[in-house]
Amino acid sequence: MHIETQAELLKLSRLLECEENALDFLDGQDLGQLAAFRNTVSAFFYGQHQDSYQRLAGISKLVPTGASAKLATSVLGSVLAAGIASELPAERAIKLADKLPDDFLAKLCIHLEPSQSRDLLSAMPDKIVARVAQTLLSMDEHITLARFVAVIQPSALQAITATVNSGEAMVKIALYLEDKSKLDTLLELLSEEQQRATVKAATEHELWPAVLSLNGHVNTTLRGRMGNMVAEQGDAVLSHLIEVASEQRLWTNLLQAVNAMDNQHQQNVVNLETLRKAPVMESLISTVAEENSWDELLDLLPLLDQAHLAPAIEVLTGSQAATLAQALESAHDSKLLGLFGHLPDSAIPTMAAAIKANAASQWQAFADRNADAHEIEALKTALN
Amino acid sequence: MSDSISTLKSKGLPAEAMAFIESLPADQGSRLADAVLAALATKDTRVEKAMNNALNVVPGPFRRPVKKMLFG
């Protein structure tokens, strides 16, 4: 199961209070639709009792905050308190929060309905948010923390990130973020040491699928910085990463990461021995074809030494030869020229035969567009 | 349409969530509707229990009017 589907189903199973794997039958459903369903059901659940919450909030306003806090912890409990807090004016809720013990407040946050608590959380002072966040971290409440990230003030987010020293927690919070566009902000707030800790945690806690998947959501600069940190982990980690990309079909994400790395790291990654394995190369090319990420792959193929290029060409002209038509149609011409110009003489006849059998018309259009390109002269001759 | 799907509809689950459930293969839709109904029941019980706990601290003679005020 794709890691982001896994994360979404975990959130839904928490909402529906069922076993973690009980909803696995929903694997394959559109992620956006699953998230929309979860949000609608969550709001529906809240709506069932909103009237009671509103009445209790009304009563609570008549009682001093100290007494309200005492009632909340001793009588109401965190579920009701969460509902009531969402119905209180933010100012009153903040005064109340300041009087509640951290562990109670943390449990209350777990039960907050996201659509109803946005204003409250964004108005919450940094010091309370940071305190609660620390408690939630100690409870491994990464899903709740991810919800925080989406709505709290940037200064509060900074206060939280400054104290997070677990790379594992960082990766999980990032994975559960509802709005992945917040990922750049979150990662930028981490110190270099913390960023390195996330990379290290990926190896130590088998979180590479999450890291690879998240990589697709970050900007190129961050992707490059994080990519270089990954590359510095050494060949054993990189080989493992390739295996994970192969097993989980996260090749496009990995290719994007490698493309953003420094050239020296790129050379190292693409020439790892693991990449020469036939099933790995097969998985790479078929995923690239499926996800139409030819440009990402073709940028790197010229960096392959002959020992690595040979198995790539073998798959491309053999079991995956049918994908050549798509590559010729959708990849950028300059990137295709890079590949064809890099072919060893011995591979020209095989490539020509594969093109002739699978992509003759696409080749013709490509050759017409690039009539003057010296990179394809040998192929053109072989094809005529 | 399965019983649980009809029940959810009658309980007012919004149309977009119903549409998602109904877009699934019948057995999956039914399983998901069962899960939503079970969660709804669990949450109802939890809130009801918390409400009763809250009412229990109200002195006996005032309990009924407070309950009426809270639950209508």
Image (cartoon, coloured by chain):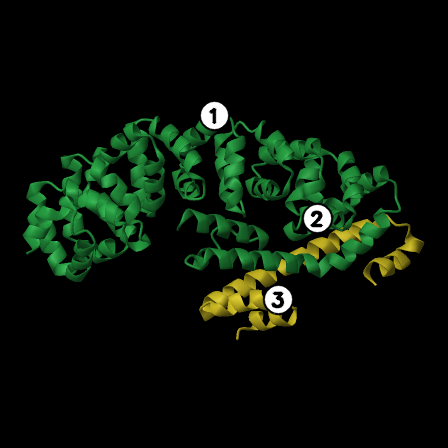
- Closest to the observer, A98 or A101: A98
Could you say where residue A258 lies in the image, as x and y percent from the top left?
32, 36
Could you say where residue B68 lies in the image, as x and y percent from the top left?
86, 61
Task: Using the image, name the chain to which the residue with label 2 belongs.
Answer: A
Are the residues under marks 1 and 3 on the same chain? no
Name the image quarter holding residue A297: top left
Furthest residue toward top: A193
Which residue corresponds to the image point at 9% horizontal and 45% vertical from the top-left? Answer: A347
Q: Label 1: few (<14), some or many (≥20) within 10 Å?
A: some
Q: What residue type is labelled 3?
A: Pro
Q: Name the residue under label 2.
A: A79
Rendered yellow, the chain in question is B
Element on which disc 2 rests: helix
Of labels 2 and 1, the one closer to you: 1
Could you say where residue A128 lies in the image, as x and y percent from the top left?
70, 33
Compared with A165, B40 (above or below) is below
Q: Do the CB atoms of the residues marked 1 and 3 lie less than 8 Å apart?
A: no
Q: What residue type is labelled 1?
A: Glu
Are the residues under marks 2 and 3 on the same chain? no
Chain A painted colour? green
**Disc 1 to disc 3, C-alpha distance:** 46 Å
Q: Which mark is residue B14?
A: 3
Which residue corresponds to the image point at 58% horizontal and 34% vertical from the top-left? Answer: A137
A372 displayed left or right of B31:
left
Q: Which mark is residue A192?
A: 1
A73 displayed left or right of A117:
right
Picture quarter with the C terminus of chain A: bottom left
Element on which disc 1 rests: helix
Q: What residue type is labelled 2?
A: Val
Of labels 1 and 3, the one closer to you: 1
Task: Using the image, name the chain to which the residue with label 3 belongs.
Answer: B
